[in-house]
Image (cartoon, rainbow, N blue to C red):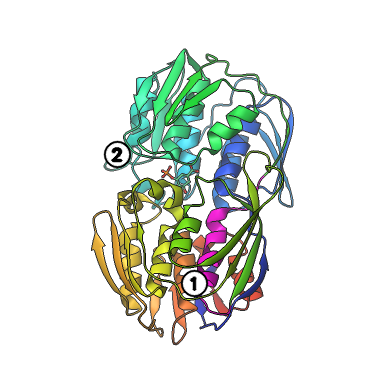
């Protein structure tokens, strides 16, 4: 297991990268393939810890799953779902836990979902409420409304529900449960969030209607829908590409191209932010959708960035990119303000506090707000320090990028968490011209 990384300053990054498959889409496809009758092949599946844990949970419920490189072959659960004898452990994955909870709510089983310390400190009341309204029993066995979760599933009925938070995980949890409900489920989102579930439902011919932020699905009752197995392709994860895009944008002389990356507009708000900051970015969409989402190539030429403001409806469309957006802000001239991002406090770590602490350790002036950060960018990045990732993959990677710009090496501990979303990150860093010493600890 890689425990710490020492990142060396780097004058220039250049090259072409294909990032691993999209994490959100991989989770959803594994689940939908497990619901289908027969064998599905998912090419470009993200073989990271998060997604593998979801696949293991589906296997426990009766799905067949075999990895062939980055192709996941799934045999759908044929007949009633198996009653697990032990809690299903989804590790670090909020998507795994919340979406599986939706599926399990519709099965006549009592199941427990658990995860690591980070996941068991994240709020689960947000899924308990709608699932209970639909008729499931949901007990939160952890402290303060957190996992482990015990779900007593069974007969569900449709609900009309206004989501209290802009969360694609909660929306998707309810949509998956709604497949097994009697009657119609209608959801209203406070702001548009990533729509991978909706896109996949449409491809599968599921009766989902959408009008602005209002979604409505006619349920199929306890047996659920009859879904045919099929083959899928997962595009590269824009959230993984984001680290290279921001790094290259802020580095004069850099030139980085990301190929075959997902370009769903509800995921790519970081491109708008970087462009506002003055980044030189060219997007070349591919002719075809890759399964469900637009994809293509993004090329960035480095230059000097200027500060910007990030907030409002943009936030859900770059929620996972905010740590790296903060890094771009630290590298830009002037002030960058990130607000309306309170949700960052309940991600894999409290990303507002963790980013603020790390930026300060590197000599950057930051003010922390309840819902965001104000960063005074453009000052020298003082290396020679050791930072914590707080066990959060995106904090580890965002800080690794910032470390490239420091005046001396920076150590980040622990870094094994990077594998939850981006196995191969350190190799890609080296391929692009960076230099990292990984220290192993078993
Ligand atoms: C995800 C949605 C987002 C995001 C997470 C993945 C998804 O969470 O932060 O990494 O796959 O639906 P929220 O929907 O809770 O904001």
Residue 386 to residue 171: above or below: below
- For residue 383, which numbered disc appears in the image? none
Tell whether position 225 is magenta.
no
| Element on which disc 1 rests | helix
On whether ligand 1 comes within 8 Å of the CB at mark 2, the answer is no
Q: Is mark 1 within 8 Å of ligand 1?
A: no
Q: Are marks 2 and 1 in contact (CB under 8 Å)?
A: no
Judged left or right of residue 294, residue 117 is: left
The residue singled out by tag 2 in the image is 145
- Answer few, some or many: residues within 10 Å of disc 2's Cα (few below 14, many 20 plus, some between 14 and 19): some
For marks 2 and 1 on the same chain, the one whose residue lies earlier in the sequence: 2
C-alpha span from label 2 to label 1: 35 Å
Whole-percent x and y of residue 348?
Answer: 41, 53
Quick one: 81 or 399, which is closer to the camera? 399
Residue 235 magenta-highlighted: yes
Q: Seen in the image, is 361 located left or right of residue 265?
A: left
Where's residue 106, x and y in %?
49, 22
Residue found at x 43% / y 68%: 328
- Which residue in the structure is indicated by mark 1? 401
- Tell which tag, 2 or 1, sits nearer the viewer: 1
Q: Nearer the viewer, residue 396 or 321?
A: 321
Magenta highlight range? 234-253
The quadrant of the image that shows the C terminus is bottom right
Quick check: can you spot residue 128?
yes
Identify the residue shown where x is 55% and y is 15%.
220
Q: Is residue 376 above or below residue 260?
A: below
Q: Residue at x 24, y 55 (%)?
A: 370
Label 2 secondary element: loop
Q: In the picture, residue 17 is in which quadrant?
A: bottom right
Left or right of 241 in this view: 382? left
């Amino acid at each position: 297991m890689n425990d710490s990384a020492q990142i060396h300053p780097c004058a220039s990054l250049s090259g072409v990268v294909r990032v691993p498959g999209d994490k959100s889409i991989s989770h959803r496809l594994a689940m939908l393939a497990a619901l289908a009758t027969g064998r599905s092949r998912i090419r470009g599946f993200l073989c990271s810890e998060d997604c593998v844990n979801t696949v293991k949970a589906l296997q426990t419920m009766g799905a067949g799953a075999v990895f062939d490189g980055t192709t996941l072959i799934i045999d759908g659960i044929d007949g009633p779902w198996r009653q697990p004898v032990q809690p299903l452990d989804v590790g670090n994955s909020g998507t795994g836990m919340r979406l599986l909870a939706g599926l399990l709510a519709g099965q006549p089983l009592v199941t427990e979902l658990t995860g690591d310390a980070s996941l068991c400190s994240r709020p689960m009341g947000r899924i308990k409420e709608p699932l209970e309204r639909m008729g499931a029993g949901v007990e939160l066995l952890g402290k303060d409304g957190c996992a482990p979760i015990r779900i007593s599933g069974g007969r569900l009925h449709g609900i009309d529900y206004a989501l209290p938070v802009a969360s694609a995980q909660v929306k998707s949890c309810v949509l998956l449960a709604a497949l097994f409900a009697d009657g119609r489920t209608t959801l209203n989102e406070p702001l548009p969030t990533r729509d991978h579930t909706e896109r996949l439902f449409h491809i599968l011919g599921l009766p989902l209607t959408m009008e602005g932020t209002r979604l409505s699905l006619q349920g199929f009752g306890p047996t659920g829908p009859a879904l045919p197995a099929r083959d899928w392709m997962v595009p590269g994860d824009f959230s993984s590409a984001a680290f290279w895009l921001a790094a290259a944008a802020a580095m004069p002389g850099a030139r980085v191209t990301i190929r075959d990356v997902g370009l769903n507009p509800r995921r790519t708000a970081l491109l708008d932010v970087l462009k506002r900051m003055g980044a030189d970015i060219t997007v070349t969409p591919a002719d075809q959708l890759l399964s469900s989402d637009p994809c293509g190539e993004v090329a960035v030429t480095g230059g000097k960035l200027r500060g910007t403001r990030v907030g409002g409806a943009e936030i859900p469309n770059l929620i996972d990119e905010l740590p790296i957006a903060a890094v771009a802000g630290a590298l830009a001239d002037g002030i960058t303000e990130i607000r309306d991002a309170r949700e960052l406090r309940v991600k894999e770590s409290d990303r507002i506090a963790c980013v603020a602490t790390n930026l300060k350790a590197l000599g950057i002036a930051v003010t922390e707000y309840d819902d965001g950060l104000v960063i005074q960018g453009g000052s020298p990045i003082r290396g020679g320090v050791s930072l914590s990732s707080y066990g959060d993959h995106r904090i580890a990677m965002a800080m690794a990028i910032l470390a490239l710009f420091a005046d001396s090496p920076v150590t980040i501990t622990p870094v094994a968490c990077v594998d939850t979303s981006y196995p191969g990150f350190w190799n890609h860093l080296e391929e692009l011209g960076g230099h990292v010493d990984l220290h192993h600890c078993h």
